[in-house]
Image (cartoon, rainbow, N blue to C red):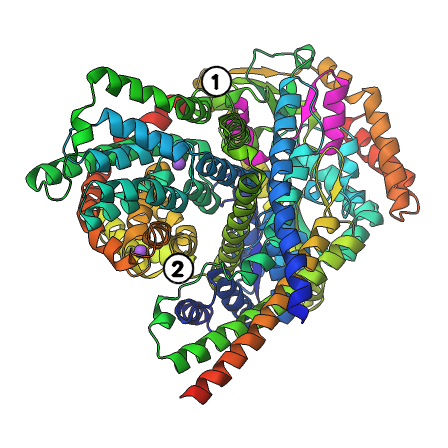
Amino acid sequence: MLQRVLTPVIGFLAELCGWLLILVMGFLIVDLISRGLSKPVYGVAEMAMFTMIAIVYLGLPQAESVRSHVRVDFIVEHLPPRLRAACEFLVQVLSSVTVAILLYAVGKNALIAYERSQAVAGPVPLVVWPVKFIMVVALALYLTQLLLHTVLAAQDLFTTRERD
Amino acid sequence: MDFMMVGVIGVVAFLTLLFVGLPIALAFILVGFTGTVALLNMNAGLSLLGETMYTAIASPTFTVLPLFVLMGAFAAASGFAERAYRAINRAAARIPGSLAIATSFGSAAFATICGSSLATASVFGRVAYPEMRRYGYDKKFALGSIACSGTFASMIPPSGMFILFSIFTEVSVGRLFMAGVVPGVLTACIYAASMYLRARANPALAPISEEEHAVTPRERVAALGGLWQIAILGGLVIGGLYGGLFTATEAGAIGAFGTLVFGLLNGPLRRFRIFAGALRESASITATLFFIIIGALFFSRFLGLTRIPFELSNFLQTWDVEPWVILALILLTWFVLGMLVVQSAVFALTLPILFPIVVELGYEPVWFCVIAMKMNEIAGVTPPVGLNAFSLAGAAGDEVKVNEVFAGVWPFIVCDIVVLILLIAFPQIVLFLPNTMLG
Amino acid sequence: TTLTFATNTAPNNLRGIAETIFIEELAAQSNGEIEVVPYWGSSLMDGREILGGVRDGVADMGFVNINYYPNRLLLNSSFMLFPRGPVSYEDRMTVFRSAYSDIPDLADELSEEGVKVVYLYGVMPFAGTFTKDVSSLEGFDGLRIRASSRWYLNLLDAVGATPVSVPWSECYQALQTGAIDSVFTNLDGIHRASLDEVAPNVFIMNQLWLPTPFLITINEAKWEGLSDAEKDAFAKAWDSAEKKFAEKYGAMFDEVVKAQKDAGYKVTFATDEEADAFANLPQVAANRETWISEAKDAGATDPEATLEKLKGLISASLGN
Ligand code: NA
Ligand code: NA
């Protein structure tokens, strides 16, 4: 059920990330041209950096939903089905725990950044909390997707056991 | 608890989780966090983790990586690999193993505009493999050629892997790019020579087709003209860096933009589905790759906290052996790890620790990164974990099994080892370009 | 007591030497009771993370560069509003130390971040390293110059330059490629990063004193947990480390200048008139206005008073 709501949201964000890459490219070309013309536009390189950070985090839930996070699976693949299902379940649980910790740590960090108006040093200080809150939202979606995969892995472990 | 002990347990735990199948980035983070909490406390662990997740990539310099990924994706989607392959194939007609030689030089040409080995191997898997099979080339020979030639994309600039190395060692990207040119071309030539010799000794590997006999000398030369777009784009990026016109990040922006323009002019990128696909793919690579970088940096901070890198380098500096023994041990470690672990993790795990040691021993930083890159190329095609081989097996179709690819790579690994020995014996091969160009 | 210390510098340069001397003096003054375990070269935390990291106990002590925290250490950045200052190392340290003892706002702001200053040192004065032949302030006109502090970018703008912000790690290549014409920063930083290699016209502005005290801070809770004898050792170590480093500083400055001249670079020193011209730019007053209004927005009660006190200390040191 939840997956049906989640998939389009995650898919939309993944699509958005691609277009944001064009934006990064555009920012840097503007930076290059403006600097070449001795009329530098302040903060363009920083905006490119913030956009890049957003791309990285917003792309994580999609990578999880299509299971493209880089992992070593050649050992797991050679295990007997039941052990393999157990391994898969363990991996999903550990992944969920890790991302939950991440979400908490980054959330806490983002709040502090907001309260103390943490900023990037430059001609005009640029506050960093907006991008940190994007990171929080992205990690929350990532965690949701992981929990759904954990439920699937648990079902799989259960049915594999019955088949034995 | 003893700091060193926590570190050792951490490394073992990391490798265990990795082999159980936990995504690398998460294994780095989970172990790094648990270890930091054990060494300090919960509050400090959460603080360091939360902060690293942002600062690890919060540098405008890092935007260079997605830009070159984007450039590669545009290039792959625009049919540049096909052009390179066809042109060189025609120029090399009638030479024993010409289709394989075209794969080697075609990959090298494509590598000047694409920074990803995986993309290169999979694109040539779609382009070159069916051709080679159509003319009766030996399956393993064909697959080995493609998988190994794909690795040029990392050695010949632009290169996503060099950018990664630069992040972990703080050696300038521009310098690394310059240093990879000669070793990359050298490897392509040695591959081509080995293909020629093997095909001549055993014509069954690579039969010469009727069509090849029909190619006139004029056609050979004309065929190379098909490479002009690649020459312009590659020349713009490499030449711009080489001639000191722009920085690596700027080269990335210009390269991606130029490839987009050519892709639009040539047609393929005008199709919205292909264009959006290239964007989506680049974003996805950017996300997964940077997540590994973030995890690796957090893990290396945890290791830093345990003082293992510090004690290890102290030990190695006072260890009474010749520096080359240590270098040999490092190469051996990389070879073994490269077989078992995904490349990005091998170097994310070892470079932050080994790099300062090696530099302290008197080895040239840029040279060392190129040696690491050579080992990275070997790691990409060696079983059981060889991403290039997987990527090729996926691209070449259902009838290709990954173990058939692995079976074909060994003669090329021998070539790689020959190149490696040359680079170690004559560091000038590596250092000549960056030193003369960048001072 | 064993204390961990996070810094972003390597141990083998001017900054590393300053920090090492302090660590050694701490051990000496406490008869070996206090041992500091350093994490050099950002191996534990990046320069921008250390303030928060020391607050949260990631490290007990840490190096803090005020410029990295534009909003969080706004009051402490007030030094940057005074371009002209004393030249000798001793005089600079006197100004910095009296500022921290006489102006409670500075220490209070750090206290809000959960840290306390236990030592401070200075680096070499401002210099511009140019790709083009520049040997006077007039030469700045129309050139693209990189600086890190926002207050100095404004001043460079006021002398006719085009101020640009390029990441420190890209400066070498940016100079080499002509993306920028100059980097304006502390002389030792220029030489350490070999920027003078690609931009061999060095214009040293000794009178501009680099108004950034480089702070060594400690976690407040950790500080409270120390014995009186240990706190006393910290105070003594500050005095003796400062003296020892001051003795080395002059020679290190001369060494850099000599190395640059030996390499064939053109080294010019700014005249007093040029330094005054820079320090009397209308933009200096504008910077102070901006700073005052931002400080008020951030809740400071009397930022004007802070500036007055600082002005007094610096004038006294300059002897006028
Ligand atoms: Na490449
Ligand atoms: Na491998």
Q: Determine if residue B40 is in view.
A: no
Q: Position of residue B315 (x, y in %)?
A: 33, 58
- Quarter holding the C terminus of chain C is top right
Q: Quadrant of residue C231?
A: bottom right
Tell me the tag on residue B325: none
Above or below C221: residue B142: above
Three-letter code for the amino acid on which mark 2 is drawn: Glu
Quarter of the image for the N terminus of chain C: give it: bottom right
What chain is tagged by disc 2?
A: B
| Marks 1, 2 in one chain | no
- Determine whether, in the image, residue C75 is placed left or right of residue A152: right
B390 within the magenta span? no
Q: Which quarter of the picture shows residue B216? A: top left
Report whether the residue tagged 1 is closer than 8 Å to ligand 1. no
**Mark 2 falls on what kind of element?**
helix
Does the magenta-highlighted stretch encompass residue C165?
yes
Residue marked by disc 2: B311
As drawn, the residue found furthest toward the left would be B201
Residue nearest the viewer, comparing B331 with C53: B331
Q: Nearer the viewer, mark 1 or mark 2?
A: 2
- The local crowd at label 1, few if under 14, some if 14 to 19, many if 20 or more residues have their Cα within 10 Å, is some
Start-end of magenta stretch = C148-175
Q: Nearer the viewer, residue C59 or A79?
A: A79
| Magenta stretch prevailing secondary structure | helix
Q: Residue at x 20, y 33 (%)?
A: B98
Q: Which residue is mark 1?
A: C261
Q: Residue at x 53, y 34 (%)?
A: B269
Q: In this rendering, is residue B312 above or below B429?
A: below
Query: Which residue type does callout 1 highlight?
Result: Lys
Say whether marks 1 and 2 touch (CB < 8 Å): no
